Amino acid sequence: MSDHRAPAALTGEDLETWSALATVLEWLPAALDAQLQHDASLAHFEYGVLYALAGAPDRTLRMSVLAGYANSSLSRLSRAASRLESRGWVRRTPDPTDGRYTLAVLTDLGLRKVDEATPGHVRTVHRLVLDPLTHAQTKQLREISRRIQRAIRDEGGWQPPAIAPLADEALTPPAS
């Protein structure tokens, strides 16, 4: 009978792999935030909310769905939505099909903001993540990321609205 308990500490290659990933998990969000804050006065979280809404049918999602996509509590998302509303980029409204829910709607001004912020964000994602990798490594990173996602939780995260069978573009600006 084999012992399936986890070792008491990470060592060797396991420690090197975890250390490298943990560093990326710490450094990448700060780098994305810095670029978006500098270029578009947005936090990466806020950009993600606007981007998800831009790709949604009628630029509208239930707040609960949006919170799931963003791996966010409803209260954190609500605070971000309040900031985005105060800038005229999002509006919230009761769901006409079920008043227990609130819809987040991307305004025309919000869509312009996404269109303005996306090119710089895409350049940063390419510079920091995609360009340092070969085509094969990019595909490996995608598969590795999906496996880790499935290990964390059963339900999938946000997916691009339409994935062409051979498309390898990480981010495509939403259509106006």
Image: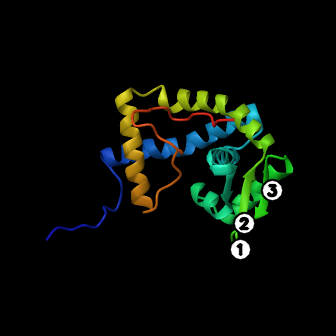
Q: Please give the residue where the numbered disc 1 appears in the rendered image.
A: 100
Q: Residue 103, position in %: x, y?
A: 72, 61
SS at circle 3: helix
Which residue does the image show at 50% across and 42% down from the upper left?
A: 162
Q: What amino acid type is highlighted by mark number 3?
A: Ser
Mark 3 and mark 2: Cα distance apart in space: 17 Å
Q: Do the residues labelled 1 and 2 touch (CB within 8 Å)?
A: yes
Dot 1 or dot 2: first in sequence order is: 2
Which residue does the image show at 63% across and 49% down from the upper left?
A: 56
Could you say which is closer to the camera, residue 59 or residue 83?
59
Dot 3 or dot 2: first in sequence order is: 3
Q: Identify the residue at the far front of this view.
A: 97
Which residue does the image show at 56% across and 40% down from the upper left?
A: 28
Mark 1 and mark 2: Cα distance apart in space: 7 Å
Q: Please give the residue where the numbered disc 3 appears in the rendered image.
A: 82
Q: Residue 154, position in %: x, y?
A: 42, 63
Q: What amino acid type is highlighted by mark number 1?
A: Arg
Left or right: 15 as drawn, with respect to 76: left
Q: Residue 136, position in %: x, y?
A: 34, 30
Q: What amino acid type is highlighted by mark number 2?
A: Asp
**Residue 95's mark?**
2
Q: Identify the residue at the far left of this view.
A: 1
**Residue 88's mark?**
none
